[in-house]
Amino acid sequence: MDPINLYEYEALAQARLTSMAYDYYASGAHDEITLRENHAAYDRIALRYRVLRDISQRSTATTVLGHQLSMPVLVAPTAFHKLAHPDGEVATVRAAGHAGTLMILSTLSTTSIEDVLAAATGPVWFQLYVYKDRGATRALVERAEAAGCSALALTVDAQVWGRRERDVRNRFQLPAGLSVKNLMPAGQEAFPKEAQDSGLAAYVASLFDQTLSWKDVEWLCGLTKLPVLLKGVVHPEDARQAADYGAAGVIVSNHGGRQLDTAPATITALPDIVDAVAGRVEVLIDGGIRRGTDVVKALAYGARAVAVGRPVLWGLAADGQSGVERVLDILRFEVDLAMGLCGCADVTEIGRDLLG
């Protein structure tokens, strides 16, 4: 029987992936408290549905930074898609286009920006890490813009790498033939060979710039014509500053529970951030979204849309592009169903009055 929900896709993916690849995708930092809490926090939120409303014609369509999307669900940036399937990020971007939504491509992609954008039929944003080599960072921005990316998502919570103990135990490395394709021109595509535990952690420690600060947000906004979002915000004061420094949006994210363990679940942090920015920038959220009801809850708190990461990888591992398409189709169906059951015919009707 084909999987009928995202949890079943994870089980199927686990059976097909190597243990090192599955652990890399699935793991969180330290005791994985935040990893578990990201979804558990959704389960504690009740939906106080409305009745006797005409829901015969429903629409899940929305806009995000001006993009017309079929649903308020984006593909979050995740690294190394070719660990899951030989077609890697190309399969993922094709599935996102087929679903009428957008993909955020990771700096740590196993396919080049140019090859991903050549396969894209929908909008693509580029997720950016800032390297000590600012020339390499500038080149990434210029390549993303030239290739056709329509926004940049600057990750601001990962200049120091969280300790992911499954990766340490497995001494995580990319298999032969895979590399960080986007950093090949700078000679920074490979993990250090002398790494004693996680090769990725060693890569980050040697290359990512720990001096990243608010002045670099100004630098990036001045470097590109593309809108810049800050990804990794959980504190309302940081969200306010993001708006002050010229960001077009914030992505409420704790890096999937992979950085600071015991950080708050993103859905817990979301309402204060929405209130703090007061409509000045768009607010997105990722982390722990597994059901259509989760999406409705995030929108009710004021998120413009959600982004999903691991479920996309489970679909990719299960059946390549078709698997990702099916994962996104399941989420669209569940969002539509949850909206109908809540008495909402359009995403604009989803508000905090639904939260019990």
Image (spheres, grey):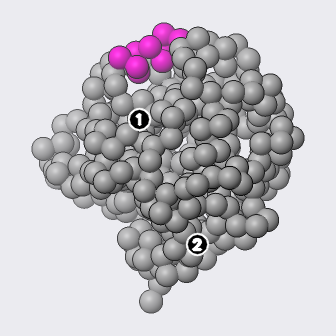
Residue that mark 2 sits on: 317
Picture residue at 76% right of the left edge, 67% below the top: 176
- Name the outermost residue toward the right: 185
From which residue to which does the magenta span run? 237-246
The residue lying toward the viewer, choosing from 45 and 347, is 45
Picture residue at 56% right of the left edge, 75% below the top: 17
Whole-angstrom CA distance, mark 2 to mark 1, is 26 Å
Say how many tags the image has. 2
Q: Is mark 2 on a helix, strand or loop?
A: helix
Residue 135: image quadrant is top right
Asked if the stretch drawn in magenta spans residue 346, the answer is: no
Q: How crowded is mark 1: few (under 14 residues within 10 Å), some or many (20 or more)?
A: many
In this rendering, is residue 174 above or below 301?
A: below
Judge whether residue 340 can be spotted in this image.
no
Q: In which quarter of the image is the N terminus?
A: bottom left
What amino acid is at disc 2?
Ala
